[in-house]
Image: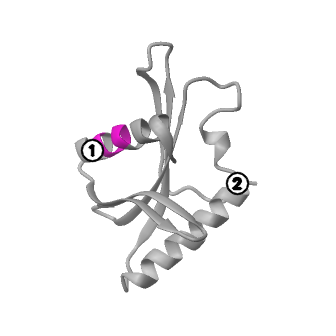
Amino acid sequence: MTGGLGQFGEAWARGYLTRKGYRILASNVHYRMGEIDIVARDSAGLVFVEVKCRRSSDFGTPLEAVTQNKYQRLSRAIGTYLQEHSMQDVPHRLDVIALELDARGTVAQVTHLEGVEPPG
C-alpha cells in the first residue's frame, strides 16, 4: 500500500496490533511479486498482515480488495520471506486488517480477519 492513505492505514494497523500484544518485526517488505504490509509475531507464531484502508466504498469495501490475484501474490511473497529467514517451519498465518474512514478521516470501522484463506 502506498501514498498518504496507505501509510496512514499501515501506521494505524501497527499501533492496533501493538496494543493487542503483537510484536512488529517488519513493515513494507518488498519483493518482485508483491509487498507484505506488516510482519508481526503473536503467541501462535508469525502473522503476515495485509492492510486495506478506504475513505468510501465507491470502489468496493476494503475486504473486497483482497482478490484471488492479491492473495496469490501475498502467498508467494510470504513464501519468499519464510525462505529468506529460514522460517519455513514456523507456524504462520495471513491476517487482513480493513479500515474504513469517516468524512473527517477518522477510523470509523475496523475489521481484523485472522487466518484468511484464498477467496472464491
Mark 2 burial class by Cα count in 10 Å: few <14, some 14-19, many 20+: few
Range of residues picked out in magenta: 11-15
In percent of width and height, residue 80 lies at: 50, 78
In reply to whether residue 50 is colored magenta, the answer given is no
Farthest top residue in view = 103
Residue 24 seen in this snapshot: yes
Q: Sequence order check: which comes first, mark 2 or mark 1?
A: 1
Closer-to-camera residue (113/72): 72
Give amino acid for label 1.
Answer: Lys
**Mark 2: which secondary structure?**
loop
Q: Which residue is mark 1?
A: 20
Is 52 placed above or below 48 here? above
Q: Are marks 2 and 1 in contact (CB under 8 Å)?
A: no
Q: Residues within 10 Å of mark 1 (few under 14, many from 20)?
A: few
Which quarter of the picture shows residue 63?
A: top right
User: Up-down: is 51 above or below 49?
Assistant: above
| Location of the C terminus (image quadrant) | bottom right
Q: Is residue 89 visible?
A: no
Q: How is the image coloured?
A: one colour
Number of marks drawn: 2
Q: Position of residue 49 (x, y in %)?
A: 45, 54
Residue 66 in the image: x percent, y percent?
A: 64, 49
Q: Is residue 120 left or right of residue 4?
A: right
Instruction: Measuring from the top left, give residue 17's x and y in whole percent.
Output: 31, 46
Q: Is residue 14 magenta?
A: yes
Q: Which mark is residue 113?
A: none
Kindly give the residue lying farthest to the right in the view shown.
Answer: 120
Q: Residue at x 56, y 55 (%)?
A: 116
Residue displayed at 27% across by 44% down: 20
* Residue name at image x 67 percent, y 41 percent: 64
Instruction: Please name the residue that numbered disc 2 is placed on.
Output: 119
Dividing the picture into quarters, in which one does residue 4 lie?
top left
